[in-house]
Image (spheres, helix red, strand yellow):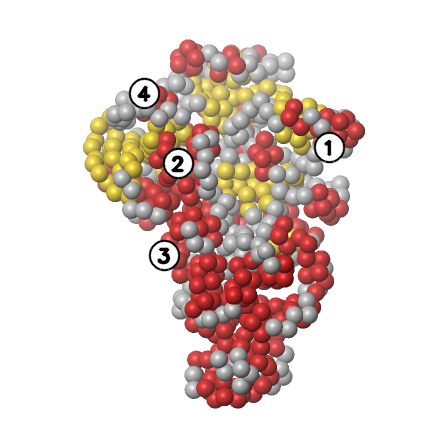
Amino acid sequence: MLLNNGELVKAAQIAETDLALKSYLKNIVNKPIYGFRNEVSEISQIFGILGVSSSQQTVHNYMVSLLSPSKWVLFKLNSNSFHELQAQLSRKWKTILAHLEINDIDIESSITLLPASIIVTEALFSDKKADVELLRATSDIDFNTILKRLCGLDLFDVCEKIGKKWEMSDTVIKIVQAASGEKPSEDSIVNNLGKWMHLLLFYELSQPTFIEAGLNDFISFNVDYVEDIYNDFATLMEIE
Amino acid sequence: MRALVKDGIGVFSPQGFLDGDNTAMILTIDDIDATVKLNVNMILVSLKKVIFFNRNGLDIFVKMFSKVRSTNHIKVGFCDYDLKKFNAINNFYKNDISFSLFETQEIASLFSSHFKHKDLKILLYNEDKSQRSALAIELHDNGHNPVIAQTLEEFNTKKIAKKAYDIIIKNSLLGQMGESVATRVTGNAIIYTLSTFLDADIGSIFDISYHSNSLNVGFRLFIFDAYKVVSMNVHGLNFFSRLASSAAEYNATICFVGLTFEKIPLSFKENMEDSGIMFFTQMEDILENKKLLEELGASSAGSANKRVLNKGMVTELPQFIEATVATIEMMTNSKAVKDAASIDKIKILDSNDKIASSIGFYGEIDGMVILVFPKEIAKKACQLLIGEQTDDINLILDTLAELVNIVGGKIKTLLADQDINVNITLPRTYKNIDSLMEVAQGRKGVQVDLSFDNDKFLFFLTR
């Protein structure tokens, strides 16, 4: 709430009392992708450097990471690699929004909800790992479809429920639903952002670490959905 | 990454971006080994969900392909691409394409020896004349009717009549072929396809363990399709004579079809006949003669092999039930329960509108699991895999085969936990109870009535 209102100093004072959050923020902001030469250790300093929108995004990432298991079973992940995925998505999403000339704190935060789909998958399927592997060796079916056919809800519906619980805006939830690649939005702006987010997710899930973690095919990539923005994306991400 | 295996083809489906950094993570030698063990005759990488790839990325696959082909003698390549991707691959490798390219998995399946549908009318064009011929010959050998367009103009004219063809092939090509002896099952006969020269190499390209296991699980007729054989030397002769001797122990028959003796000494034929091998001019002479099939043992695989359940099997019975129950529970998201169990011959009270599927296993213990479902219940059990309402019986049977394949995989895993190693055969399906009884009639086994959501189905374990 304080971050939403731009009250960074007060927010930093409260964050200082949460040692886990403090450690998370320090760990994230000192990653090479942020490019700081000296270690940044004070929360007020971190919030100051990140600014309101990125601070809010980072705190959301922290909240999502609280849902992650202490030991990953289904995916070969650990807290470091999961935080790395969150950080990469957040940084690149910011670049995309700048390219699209969108300056909206809520929309910037929307990317933080996406990795929740991975946590939900891990939580629901980890104790059925061998069975699911057998099923997927026989039929071309992703986790999202398995869940939808068994329960009528998919991973992104579960993410929507998390987003609503955390009082995230409707726009954020619609973007994340569109980013599933299965449910395009009728709102052209939301739909376009859904396409960029869907492509960004699979760009990250094509990184060696995440392929090795078994994330590359946990949900289905809809190539047709993102075809029209691919060239722009490739230029922005300098893909050759 | 795990491959999806269907109709003898293992398909890896990476998503997103492929470059030199990540490709090695997608396809490892362990992934390939695990897939080859599932008795595939083709390994493909699908590019359907790949939006970007470069030469470095594909190079890693291509090197892996070359290793797999030379070690395992199977077809390898890429599938599921559009024209842009096809042109890019051609550009990268120009005239040095050693792997196969299939526009879709459906087209790839036409070149798999496991493919079930025959007699498809296929319009075919490739700008390279030798490719056109290679594709047409392979399609013809696999029992299809290829119509070759000699020019692009002819192709474009012919393809307007879309309904005249079951499949149209344009941007596909065959790389260096796998050289293993292709295997397919028809009814209760196993057909092996041989080609070129039969010499000492036959020992390394013929899967002798598959053959032995087929004998063990009750197959009694083995047909060698030898239309493409040019010649045979004394090593080939010795190999087949030995094979015939081992088959005799099981009262099995070995036949050769289409073998000519223009370049093979006639004395070889006499030697082979002395070993019990029979010769036929055409495949139809055997497959379309029901009486002959019966005499040769192909329609009595079940009755010729009435072995009793042994202690090992009964001890492991809970694993078999557990595998079936766990699979049904996973597929239906409901509780599966065991209603009744008995040791006897299979009893199906009402055989109307029922379908069945079976899977064999062999190794430290051997036998067969049969599942019998009312058609509507089978649809319900397979709902997760089908995903939509359907009355297409072939789709339902194919899906039931997938389900029983999952049960087989689960059995394999549960037995491995007990340090019992088994392999599983390809699943078989039965459109009605009569066709099931041809195999199961007279066999003793354990029958268990199971149900989920009060929908009843039958489990039968036999040897």
Point out which mark residue B379 bears.
Answer: 2
**Vertical order, B351 against A161 (above or below):** above
Location of the C terminus of chain A by quadrant is bottom right
**Vertical order, B195 against B295 (above or below):** below
- In 3D space, how far apart are the residues under numbered discs 3 and 1 (Cα atoms)? 49 Å
Query: Disc 2 marks which amino acid?
Result: Lys
For the residue labelled by badge 3, is the local secondary structure a helix, a strand or a loop?
A: helix
Would you call the spot at circle 3 few (<14 residues within 10 Å), some (14-19), or many (20 or more)?
Answer: few
**Does residue B303 appear left or right of residue B110 in this picture?**
left
Of the residues under marks 1 and 4, which one precedes in the sequence? 1
For the residue labelled by badge 2, is the local secondary structure a helix, a strand or a loop?
A: helix
Q: Residue at point 46% right, 31% down?
A: B392
Label 3 vs label 2, nearer the camera: 2
- In 3D space, how far apart are the residues under numbered discs 4 and 2 (Cα atoms)? 30 Å
Q: Are marks 4 and 2 in contact (CB under 8 Å)?
A: no
Would you call the spot at circle 1 few (<14 residues within 10 Å), some (14-19), or many (20 or more)?
Answer: many
User: Which residue, given by chain and number where applicable, does mark 4 sit on?
Assistant: B303
- In 3D space, how far apart are the residues under numbered discs 3 and 4 (Cα atoms)? 42 Å
Place of residue B274 in the rendered image (x, y in percent of width and height, measured from the top left) = 46, 13
Q: Residue at point 65% right, 67% down?
A: A96
Q: Are marks 1 and 4 in contact (CB under 8 Å)?
A: no
User: Which residue, given by chain and number where applicable, does mark 1 sit on?
Assistant: B126
User: Which residue, given by chain and number where applicable, does mark 3 sit on?
Assistant: A127
For the question of whether residue B341 can be seen, the reply is yes
- Same subunit, labels 1 and 4: the answer reads yes
Query: Disc 4 marks which amino acid?
Result: Ser
Would you call the spot at circle 4 few (<14 residues within 10 Å), some (14-19), or many (20 or more)?
Answer: some
Toward the viewer: B248 or A21?
Answer: A21
